[in-house]
Amino acid sequence: MPLNGLHLLLTYQCTMECDHCFVWSGPAAHGTMSLANIRHILRQAEELGGIEWIYFEGGEPFLFYARLLTGVRLAVRKGFRVGLVTNAYWGTGVEEARWALRPFRGLVSDLSVSSDLYHGDAVEARYAENTRAAAAELGIPCSILSVAQPEDARAAKRVGQLPPGTSAVMYRGRAAVRLAGRAPTVPWSTLRRCPYENLRDPSRVHINPEGTVQLCQGISLGNVFETPLREIIRAYDPEAHPIVGPLLKGGPVALTRTYGLTHRARYADACQLCYEARRSLRRRFWSILGPDPLYGIV
Ligand code: SF4
């Protein structure tokens, strides 16, 4: 597995409750990584080898500012490059954004700011622009990420980590429940591959506050607080994995057929069918299909 990035979900908590959020974040969400857990994960990343990037994201990681800054410093000290993903709720002016970002100067190699209609109106968009201006002054590379509305058929589908610019919605997590009804649909039988993640050879995985290593949000490979990351990655056998194996063979259609699940005639995309199939398989594969927050259970 050419894994070179770990994305640490510092917290499920967020200032906003966006309809397109994969991880069901919001003000009422619970679960945050402790500093001890961040240290533990960074040590495991070193032992694993090959990891170049550590991203801190959420939820909204700036809600836990001291923990975030300390985690970033620790990661840089260990030689990792660091990225942050934020909604920049704190960028209420360029001066405030400069104040919040100054301690990260020289430490952060990629600052991604989410800004689109899910994240509010012109006021929130201004916060993102203030943050971009402050980052430019401080020499912190910064880009704006935005996700299109479901009705926008021109938005590009992106693979893996969202790049700068506007991307199409992926209908997993809260988006599968709240947004799929507004999207154009396709026949279920066409959804024969996973369009967004490299499930066989992922270049990055997410690690959630409770320690689960997520291949795609809601598909866990193990828990770094129970098993060393190196062993989890070494033991990963995509074809033999009860969820990934069928997905590799024939996408969410094969997953649905393998376990004889009922389905509807049409879906917004492969992720919606995949997410619904996995939700109905949770009792059977509870240690793989979790944790609860990723299926909307607070
Ligand atoms: S099809 Fe399934 S595994 Fe692939 S990106 Fe969508 S939700 Fe994730």
Image (cartoon, grey):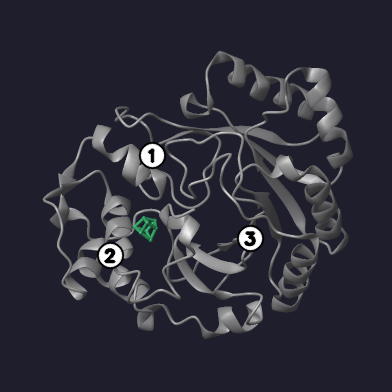
Q: Secondary structure at mark 3?
A: loop
Q: Pointer 3: what residue?
A: 209
Check disc 2 and report the residue beneath it. Answer: 280
Q: Percent from the top left, x then y, of residue 220?
A: 48, 70
Q: Amino acid at mark 3?
A: Pro
Instruction: Residue 103: give x, y in percent of width and height.
Output: 88, 39
| Number of on-image labels | 3
Q: CA distance from mark 3 to mark 1?
A: 24 Å
Figure check: 267 above or below 17:
below
Frontmost of labels 3 and 1 is 3
Disc 2 is placed on an element classified as: helix
Instruction: Give the Cα distance between marks 3 and 2.
Output: 24 Å
Q: Earlier in the sequence, mark 3 or mark 2?
A: 3
Badge 1 marks a residue whose secondary structure is loop
- The residue mark sitting in front, 2 or 1, is 2
Tell which circle, 2 or 1, labels the residue nearer the N-terminal end: 1
In the image: residue 45, left or right of residue 192: right
The one nearer the camera, 288 or 134, is 288
- Residue at mark 2 to residue at mark 1: CA–CA distance: 22 Å
- Label 2 beta carbon less than 8 Å to ligand 1: no
Decide: is 48 above or below 159.
below
Q: Quadrant of the N terminus?
A: bottom right
> Can the viewer see residue 137 in this picture?
no
- State the residue in front, 139 or 32: 32
User: Ligand 1 lies in which image quarter?
Assistant: bottom left
The residue at 32%/27% (across/down) is 152
Q: Is residue 274 something one can see in this rendering?
A: yes
Q: Residues within 10 Å of mark 2 (few under 14, many from 20)?
A: some
